[in-house]
Image: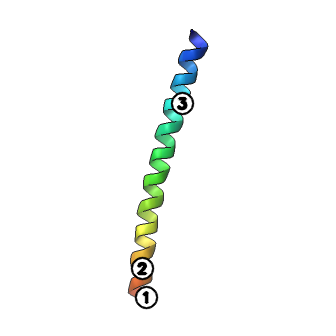
Amino acid sequence: MILASQTMCLYGFLKQYIFQSACLLRISFYKLRKNAFKSL
């Protein structure tokens, strides 16, 4: 049971990390796109 709880904890941590990375990527992509439109 201990191993199962550790796996769930690790899974939750990975899910949160991936979600944060996706948000950061989306924000940086939005900024890049905005700057690209400005340079045009």
Residue shown at the point (42%, 79%) measured from the top left = 35
Residue type at mark 1 is Ser
Secondary element under disc 3, as helix, strand or loop, is helix
Is residue 26 depicted above or below 34 in this figure? Answer: above
Q: Position of residue 28 (x, y in %)?
A: 45, 65
Q: Position of residue 19 (x, y in %)?
A: 46, 45
Residue type at mark 3 is Tyr
For the residues carrying marks 3 and 2, which lies nearer the camera in this image? 3
**Disc 1 designates what residue?**
39
**Disc 2 designates what residue?**
35
**Disc 3 designates what residue?**
11
Secondary element under disc 2, as helix, strand or loop, is helix
| Mark 2 surroundings: few (<14), some (14-19) or many (≥20) residues within 10 A | few
Real-space CA distance between mark 3 and mark 2, rounded to the nearest whole angstrom: 36 Å
For the residues carrying marks 3 and 1, which lies nearer the camera in this image? 3
Is residue 36 depicted above or below 18 in this figure? Answer: below
Determine whether, in the image, residue 4 is placed left or right of residue 31.
right
Q: Which of marks 1 and 3 precedes in the sequence?
A: 3
Residue type at mark 2 is Asn
Is residue 28 depicted above or below 8 in this figure? Answer: below
Secondary element under disc 1, as helix, strand or loop, is helix
Q: Position of residue 21 (x, y in %)?
A: 49, 51
Disc 2 + disc 1, Cβ < 8 Å: yes
Quadrant housing the C terminus: bottom left
Real-space CA distance between mark 2 and mark 1, rounded to the nearest whole angstrom: 6 Å
Residue shown at the point (43%, 75%) measured from the top left = 33
Quadrant housing the N terminus: top right
Q: Position of residue 5 (x, y in %)?
A: 53, 16
Disc 3 + disc 1, Cβ < 8 Å: no
Q: Which of marks 2 and 3 precedes in the sequence?
A: 3
